[in-house]
Amino acid sequence: RTNPESKLCLLNNGQGELTEDIEKVLSFSLEMSHLTNGAFDVTVAPLVDLWNVKERNVPPTAEEIQVARSKTGYEDITLSPFSLGGKAIDTGAVAKGYIADKVAESFKEKGVENAIIDLGGNVVLIGEYKVGIRSPFNPDEIFATIAVKDKSAVTSGAYQRYFEYEGKRYHHIIDPRTGYPSKSGVASVTVISPSSMQADALSTSIFILGKDSISLCDNFPDTDALLIMENGEVIT
């Protein structure tokens, strides 16, 4: 999205055409936006840019957040006819999963029977392997391991990208409904699914919505989740 020559950046600037890949990612993103009533919002770009946790060390003001929120709204996007409705889309919570699925598809077409495809937080397994879930309390430790066969494991957590200000941590997973980093009490979410794209979007959605939203997995076949709460409770 930040590469000025990319198809996605051009679309956000009102230029270029909708490609097949972006259409698939955007279509699924809109499904998730509706399914979660906006907790997952593909138009979250202005808020992501505002918080910019890689470079920020002071949180934005309430006024700045309100202005950024006014520029979001997945309801304004239509696919037929295609229109972004003046919004900018951010596929950060879903595109990596889509790419991982495409890599796995390519491997299988070439006859690969065993592979670990690791895109950092998104792992696709061809064959059966044990996947380690990093501890959100000590990222150098493995909290648990799960045996996974021919599925994807995707983890969302607040422990890798953040900044601290006046003793408070501000992480990168923004709740579009408030404009602030999510405060759901969840420390880490791992979703296991045949589709890495689905697991990617679900892990973000459940992280934002909290433990009761683990039931979102029921909307997708053969999909499960493991939540580690900030108080140490584990929910599966």
Image: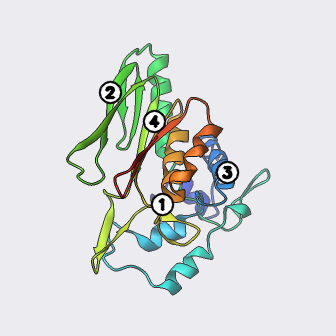
Which residue is labeled 1 in the image?
Answer: 4
Residue 130, label in figure: 2
Q: Residue at x 68, y 48 (%)?
A: 31
Residue type, label 1: Pro
Taking the view exactly as shown, the residue that stands out farthest to the right is 81
Alpha carbon distance from label 1 to label 3: 31 Å
Give above or below for 98 relative to 35. Answer: above
Tag 3 and tag 2, C-beta contact below 8 Å: no
Give SS at disc 4: helix
What label sits on residue 35 in the rendered view?
Answer: 3
The image shows residue 20, relative to residue 210, as above or below, that is: above
Mark 3 or mark 2, earlier in chain = 3
**Rendered position, 131 above or below 21:** above
Q: Residue at x 45, y 58 (%)?
A: 3
For image coordinates 47% across by 19% down, the residue present is: 108
Q: Which comes before the other along the chain, label 1 or label 2?
A: 1
Q: Nearer the viewer, mark 3 or mark 4?
A: 3
